[in-house]
Image: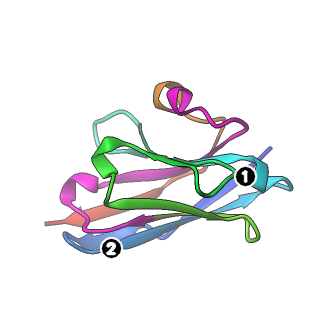
């Protein structure tokens, strides 16, 4: 069982950067794959980024490649999403998620096993 709590969301202007954080409560945090998803108003939830137990293994949605960076600190049970040069279309509730396996196909289709409650990011023009 994993409990996830996101933080770092807020209201920013276009062009700003923001770093989201996710605190995980799991005795074996380092063995979980972690990810970020988002749900914009009126749209379905979508995959944003994932990182395996090995921090060097990451995957991104095409729409955020080169702009967002996922990272993790296994010693602190934390995962982060650095978002640069934000645009109004990035406005969404961002969710932290965890999974026992690293499976990008699964994440894109049905998400991960465990979810946080989300943090709202609003980007004004």
* x and y, in percent, of residue 54 in the image: 67, 53
* Quarter of the image with the N terminus in it: top right
Residue at 26%, 65% (x, y): give it: 86
Q: Position of residue 7 (x, y in %)?
A: 53, 67
Q: Quadrant of residue 11?
A: bottom left
Dividing the picture into quadrants, the one containing residue 10 is bottom left
Q: Quadrant of residue 44?
A: top left
Nearest to the observer: residue 26 or residue 72 = 72
The answer to whether residue 113 is seen in the rendering is yes
The residue range painted magenta reads 82-107
Residue 17, which numbered label?
2
What distance separates the C-alpha of mark 2 from that of mark 1?
A: 26 Å
Of discs 2 and 1, which sits in the foreground?
2
Q: Which residue in the structure is indicated by mark 1?
A: 3
Q: Is residue 52 above or below residue 85?
A: above
Residue in the picture at 46% in, 30% down: 108
Mark 2 secondary-structure assignment: loop
SS class of the residue under badge 1? strand
Residue 108 is one of the magenta-drawn residues:
no
Which residue is the extreme one toward the left?
125
Looking at the rendered image, the quarter that the C terminus falls into is: bottom left
The label shown at residue 52 is: none
């Amino acid at each position: 069982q994993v409990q996830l709590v996101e933080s770092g969301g807020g209201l920013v202007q276009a062009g700003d950067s923001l770093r989201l954080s996710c605190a995980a409560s799991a005795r074996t945090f380092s063995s979980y794959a972690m990810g970020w998803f988002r749900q914009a108003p009126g749209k379905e939830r979508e995959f944003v980024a994932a990182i395996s137990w090995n921090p060097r293994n990451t995957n991104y949605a095409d729409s955020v490649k080169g702009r967002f960076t996922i990272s993790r600190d296994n010693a602190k049970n934390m995962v982060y999403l650095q978002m640069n040069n934000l645009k109004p279309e990035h406005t969404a509730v961002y969710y932290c998620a965890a999974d026992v396996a690293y499976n990008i196909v699964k994440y894109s289709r049905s998400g991960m096993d465990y979810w946080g409650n989300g943090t709202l990011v609003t980007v004004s023009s």
